[in-house]
Amino acid sequence: MNQPAPDDSKSWLAGFDFLIDNGSGGSSGPGFTMSPNDARSMLNLAKQARDQFGEMRRHAQILVRTTSPADEPASNNYNAKLVGDGKSGGAFSSGLANTQRMYAYADELVNKLEKALGITHAADESAAGDIKNTGSGPQPTGLAG
């Protein structure tokens, strides 16, 4: 029996996070733990995929605007199979929907990775500030100082 897949295109990574490990040890839970370098590499690949899906989406948007070469039944029927007839979608419309879904998946992956790297960057900056502030307190005075 055919059943349509649930429309989870907006939540395919829901509850699934990326943890950037700076050598402090792993953490349990759903998701991936990776080094900052691996995360940046994966982010670059995800951005490339998103860009490619975006380009495919632009081409599909052009295809769904295809019109019949002539206003006669055979051309109109064939064109309806390609772009849809208002009642049902055609092959090009299905292709457009698929490329939009792939773009959304890649975009969500990029956003999750950027968020994980942003948290790591903020933690690194905070740690660097803490180390810097450790040496900026009152200096001891005494025989050696």
Image (spheres, rainbow, N blue to C red):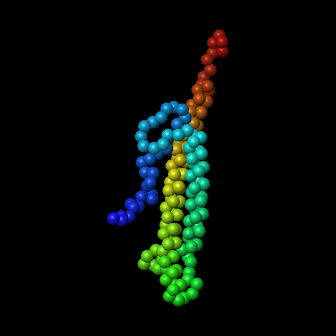
Q: Residue at x 53, y 47 (%)?
A: 113
* Figure disc tally: 0
Q: Quadrant of the N terminus?
A: bottom left
Q: Quadrant of the C terminus?
A: top right
Q: Which residue is the extreme one toward the bottom?
A: 72
**Between 40 and 3, the one nearer to me in the picture:** 3
Looking at the image, can residue 121 be seen? no
Q: Which residue is the extreme one toward the front?
A: 1
Q: Residue at x 59, y 50 (%)?
A: 45
| Residue 4 falls left or right of residue 119 | left
Q: Residue at x 56, y 65 (%)?
A: 57
Where residue 38 sits: x, y (%)?
57, 42
| Residue 89 falls left or right of residue 135 | left
**Between 133 and 72, the one nearer to me in the picture:** 72
| Residue 137 falls left or right of residue 109 | right
Q: Which residue is the extreme one toward the left?
A: 1
Looking at the image, can residue 37 be seen? yes
Where residue 36 sits: x, y (%)?
57, 40
- The answer to whether 63 is drawn above or below residue 124 in the figure is below
- The answer to whether 72 is drawn above or below residue 57 in the figure is below
Where residue 3 sits: x, y (%)?
36, 64
Quarter of the image for residue 56 reads bottom right
Where residue 11 sits: x, y (%)?
43, 55
Q: Residue at x 43, y 51 (%)?
A: 14
